[in-house]
Amino acid sequence: MENNKKNYTGIAILFLTISILIMSIGFATRSQTLQINGNTVIGEEPKWDIHFDNLNVLPGSVSGDAVTKAAEITNANSTIINYDIRLKEKGDKYVFTVDVVNAGNIYAEIGSIELIGTSEYDKYVTHKVTYADTGEEVKVGDMLNKNSTTTYKVEIENIYEKSQYEVGEYKLNLSFAVEYIQKQ
């Protein structure tokens, strides 16, 4: 009788194995792979656009023959301002304002500032860059919100105390550069 039970168990296992094999083959022939492909964009495409705009020379600045080249935004990206002036007497100055526009959709901050030539000429001129509305100095870390504008005031003044016997002219090359980076 025990032999009989072993035969039934063996036949049952064989039958189950054959059934599973047949079902797998049947499923494989009747199945299909479905695929879904697509692209998803979350948020808006980043746009970086910081430039100068709306430059205005202020009243009280030297004019006429003292201005060889008035301050102007010179390049296609509107990120460079050049000027050529003569400050003949102590107290002569040249002052202008310029808007710094963040027309992009990325928050920016000042990563570095370069004021070139000022330290070597500090006995001749003062060269200041401040915010026009507050008078505060422009400094590293200052933020410029997306889609916003701030106004810089640039001032160059002759502070040189020359003697009555001194004649001559000093040509000064002054530069101011601000690098904006993405706000972290």
Image (spheres, rainbow, N blue to C red):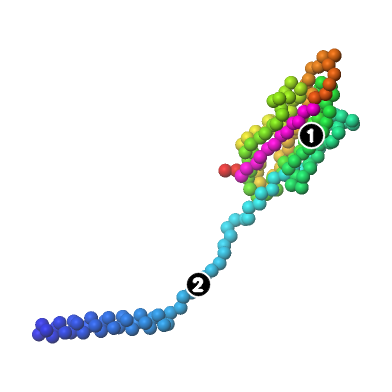
Secondary element type, mark 2: loop
Most distant residue in the left direction: 1
Give the prevailing secondary structure in the magenta stretch.
strand
Most distant residue in the front direction: 168
Q: Residues within 10 Å of mark 1 (few under 14, many from 20)?
A: some
- Mark toward the start of the polypeptide (1 vs 2): 2
Q: Residues within 10 Å of mark 2 (few under 14, many from 20)?
A: few
Please tell me which residue is depicted at 72% across the width and 41% down the height of the picture: 100
Where is residue 60 drawn, in percent x and y? Answer: 84, 28
- Give yes or no for contact between labels 1 and 2 (Cβ–Cβ under 8 Å): no
Where is residue 180 drawn, in percent x and y? Answer: 65, 41
Asked whether residue 41 appears in the rendered view, the answer is yes
Where is residue 113 drawn, in percent x and y? Answer: 66, 35
Q: Which residue is mark 1?
A: 96
Left or right: residue 157 compared with residue 8: right
Left or right: residue 16 compared with residue 46: left
Q: Quadrant of residue 17?
A: bottom left
Please state the extent of the stretch shown in magenta in the rendering: 171-182
Indicate which disc residue 35 carries.
2
User: What amino acid type should be assigned to the residue bearing mark 1?
Assistant: Phe
Q: For the C terminus, which image quadrant?
A: top right
Most distant residue in the right direction: 64
Secondary element type, mark 1: strand
Q: Quadrant of residue 163?
A: top right
- Front-most of 68 and 96? 68
How many circles with numbers are drawn on the protein?
2
Residue 15's place in the image compared with 124, above or below, is below
Please tell me which residue is depicted at 65% across the width and 33% down the height of the picture: 139
Q: Is residue 181 magenta?
A: yes
Where is residue 183 drawn, in percent x and y? Answer: 60, 43
Q: CA distance from mark 1 to mark 2?
A: 62 Å
